[in-house]
Amino acid sequence: MKVYPGIPPEIAAWIADQKIFFLASAPLSPQGHVNLSPRGLDSIRVVDPNQVVILDLTGSGNETAAHLLENGRITVMMCAFEGKPMILRLFGEGEVILPGDDEWADFRPLFDADIPGVRQIFRILVTRVQTSCGEAVPLMDFVAHRDELTNWAHEKGAAGIAQYQKEKNAVSIDGLPGPEYDREPA
């Protein structure tokens, strides 16, 4: 295991090549559910050695946002499924950035402008970078990104997505409030 105070350039380049990563967050309550969410679609960017942003698309739940609003704790994990084995964990404090927030204009242009269903951006201030061997992670070939979520968002349209967010993304499974989506659709 190696620990770094920030993301070294070679690891930042490796992050940019990954096709999938996982977000872990949890509420403060010991009875609350730990959330572990897979992500893809070229939705993570290293801004600097201690800052990562993640483009978050509308989905059936919004646990990560609710947890970040409550306590800010988050971990990003990536595994090498091809090439040299490695597991990477980025530990940090996160926040939710919504369209209309001051930082939105800084971070939204880092991602594909045409992707539908964008809900928010997570900014993570990375406090610990940790790598480990990953020698038991299987080798797998990447075929393609799935398009079901983006097709769904495209068909729903901006107004439909905004309504869905208000109805389905307002509260976590543990009853924590999510972001308030009383804004123009992204």
Image (tube, rainbow, N blue to C red):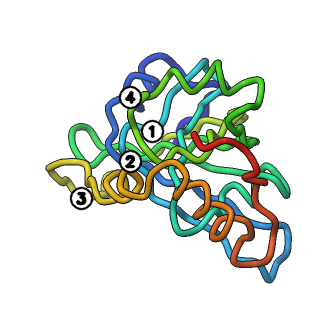
Mark found first going from the N terminus, 4 or 1: 4
| Mark 1 lies on residue | 43
Q: What's the residue type where badge 2 is placed?
A: Gly
Closer mark to the observer between disc 4 and disc 2: 2
Does dot 3 land on a helix, a strand or a loop? loop
Residue, disc 2: 40
Instruction: Check contact, mark 3 vs mark 1: CB within 8 A.
Output: no
Are discs 1 and 2 less than 8 Å apart at CB? yes
Quick one: label 3, few (<14), some, or many (20+) residues within 10 Å? few
Q: x%, y% of residue 62?
A: 63, 62
Amino acid marked by disc 4:
Ala
Q: Nearer the viewer, residue 102 or 19?
A: 102
Residue shown at the point (76%, 31%) measured from the top left: 101
- Judging depth in this view, the residue of 164 and 142 nearest the camera is 164
- What residue sits right under mark 4 in the picture? 16
Q: How many marks?
A: 4
